Image (spheres, grey):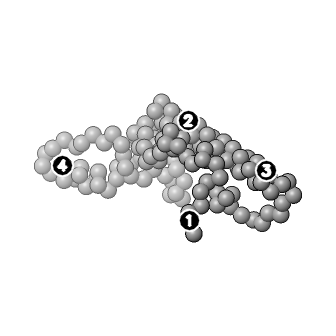
Amino acid sequence: MPPAQPICPLCAPSPAFTRGLEFDPQALERSRRSTNTAQYGPSRKQIRRAEHRAPKGLRPRAVTVPGGARAARADGMPNRAFRRDRLSEGHRDLRARQAEAAAGAAEHRRDRARTTARQIIAAHGPNLTVEDCDIRTW
């Protein structure tokens, strides 16, 4: 059985469409941590590094992005809510581009569903009985 071909050749995602969808969630987290350093502690690796440098008389390395846990109360709740964090311009820009790409992807899915429905109705007429199915397999 040959592989299923898309009904509409325009439905295949183009490289230009998928280009904006590649986001690194760790980049957002690093940006948040570097902007709000007082809310995070050093990671185990950063602590161990400082402990190894101290006996040798070396200055402690400046930690620009703390890798440890967020400062929290005894019950695990953060001392300060995430919504109160300062966000860098790059962080806000990346989130805006991410939201824009997600909106574009949603619009593309709706358009593809509309196009597929139009083609099915044109081929089979408006009176159809459809079982629960995944439109992507059509």
Disc 3/disc 2 C-alpha distance (Å): 39 Å
Asked if 84 appears above or below 137 in the picture, the reply is above
Q: Nearer the viewer, mark 2 or mark 4?
A: 2
Picture quarter with the C terminus = bottom right
Quarter of the image where one finds residue 135: bottom right
Residue drawn 50% across the image and 33% down it = 93
Label 3 with label 2: CB-CB less than 8 Å: no
Asked if 37 appears above or below 68 in the picture, the reply is above
Is residue 115 in view from this perspective?
yes
Label 1 with label 2: CB-CB less than 8 Å: no
The mark nearer the N terminus, 3 or 2, is: 2
- Residue 78 versus residue 92: which sits nearer the camera? 92
Label 1 with label 4: CB-CB less than 8 Å: no
Kindly identify which residue carries mark 4.
54
Q: Which mark is residue 96?
A: 2
Kindly identify which residue carries mark 3.
122
Q: Nearer the viewer, mark 3 or mark 2?
A: 3
The mark nearer the N terminus, 1 or 2, is: 1
The mark nearer the N terminus, 3 or 4, is: 4
Residue drawn 52% across the image and 57% down it = 76
Which kind of residue does numbered mark 3 sit on? Ala
The mark nearer the N terminus, 2 or 4, is: 4
> SS at mark 3?
helix
Disc 3/disc 4 C-alpha distance (Å): 76 Å
Which kind of residue does numbered mark 4 sit on? Ala
Where does the image place residue 12, in percent across and percent down from the top left?
57, 48
Which kind of residue does numbered mark 1 sit on? Pro
